[in-house]
Image (tube, rainbow, N blue to C red):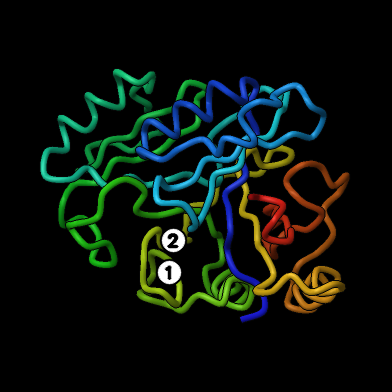
């Protein structure tokens, strides 16, 4: 495993406000050393599980308005009382969202900046244990799941936990949540994605970052037009992602 999934990067117009919403929604914490510098150019506000470590949400400043449905969203576990969990999230600032889902068993909400996310009922997904609370899955659209599975297994070092015509699920070597889910339909791409994945080399040796970027390029990544805060590369379907040493996301 040369690189692994380390963070989800989120563009936000109100970096501090959106970070606080997600920290409360997931019952995570804003990393203290990042919370005091919201105006510093390029500053990131990081939200992590309360126990520390694990995958992070990284919020970066952007003035771009949201346009259309995001290609990447989060799935939260509804727990034993899904309705109560939805009410809690609404009280934090979420709103109901209609993305054409119709009559489904899960609830679709949007955060204060309009980013869609789902709240899953118990037993909805075989790959998520009913005991899971909070963040259950990171979901990214994939028009061609076969191509995306090949690339993202190589990029993350995560193994296929389930797959079918609906797409595939990748699980970390530790066997923990969140899992990574990709499948159709794929929202048409309109400019740079507002939410993206960030990878980190498995070790922080000098020169490894460049070597891993080259390896990912050989696996199917391409340089992203204009770069930007979400990273200099895109996956085979044009989704931006970053590669950073672990210290970059605290």
* In the foreground, 39 or 91: 39
Distance (Cα) linking label 2 and label 1: 6 Å
**Judging from the image, what secondary structure is the residue with disc 2 in?**
strand
In the image: residue 154, left or right of residue 168:
right
The numbered mark, 2 or 1, whose residue comes first in the sequence reads 1
Q: Residue at x 63, y 36 (%)?
A: 33
Q: Position of residue 14 (x, y in %)?
A: 61, 20
Q: Secondary structure at mark 1?
A: strand
Tag 1 residue: 168
Q: Is residue 62 left or right of residue 113?
A: right
In the displayed structure, would residue 244 be above or below residue 47?
Answer: below
Left or right, 155 with respect to 52, comes to: right
- From the viewer's side, name the closer residue of 103 and 3: 3
Residue holding disc 2: 181
Q: Where is 80 relative to 102, above or below?
A: below
10 Å neighbourhood of mark 2: few (<14), some, or many (≥20)? many
Q: Quadrant of residue 128?
A: bottom left
Q: Position of residue 173 (x, y in %)?
A: 45, 77
**91 shown above or below 244:** above
> Which of the 4 quarters of the picture holds residue 118?
top left
Classed neighbour count for the residue bearing mark 1: other residues with Cα under 10 Å, few (<14), some (14–19), many (≥20): some
Residue occupying image coordinates x 39% and y 54%: 137
**Residue 160 - label:** none
**Residue at point 48%, 44% (across, down):** 73
Image coordinates of residue 192 in percent, x first then y, are 73, 41
| Residue 40 location (% of width, % of height) | 79, 27
Asked if the residues shown at circle 2 and circle 1 are in contact, with their CB atoms under 8 angstroms apart, the answer is yes
């Amino acid at each position: 495993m040369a690189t692994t999934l380390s963070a989800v990067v989120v563009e936000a117009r109100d970096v501090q406000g959106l970070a606080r919403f997600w920290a409360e929604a997931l019952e995570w914490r804003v990393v203290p050393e990042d919370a005091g510098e919201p105006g510093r150019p390029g500053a990131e506000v990081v939200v992590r599980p309360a126990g520390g470590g694990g995958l992070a949400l990284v919020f970066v400043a952007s003035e771009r308005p949201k346009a259309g449905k995001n290609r990447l969203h989060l799935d939260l576990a509804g727990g034993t009382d899904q309705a109560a969990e939805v009410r809690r999230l609404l009280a934090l600032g979420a709103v109901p969202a209609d993305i054409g889902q119709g009559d489904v068993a899960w609830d679709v909400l949007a955060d204060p900046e309009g980013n869609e996310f789902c709240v899953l009922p118990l037993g909805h997904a075989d790959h998520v244990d009913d005991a899971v609370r909070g963040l259950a899955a990171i979901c990214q659209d994939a028009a061609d799941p076969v191509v995306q599975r090949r690339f993202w297994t190589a990029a993350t070092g995560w193994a296929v936990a389930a797959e079918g015509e609906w797409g595939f699920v990748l699980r970390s070597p530790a066997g923990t949540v969140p899992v990574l889910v990709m499948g159709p339909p794929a929202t048409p791409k309109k400019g740079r994605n507002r939410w993206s994945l960030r990878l980190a080399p498995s070790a922080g040796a000098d020169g490894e970052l460049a070597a891993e970027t080259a390896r990912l390029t050989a696996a199917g990544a391409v340089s992203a037009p204009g770069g930007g805060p979400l990273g200099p590369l895109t996956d085979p379907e044009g989704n931006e992602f970053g590669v950073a040493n672990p210290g970059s996301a605290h």
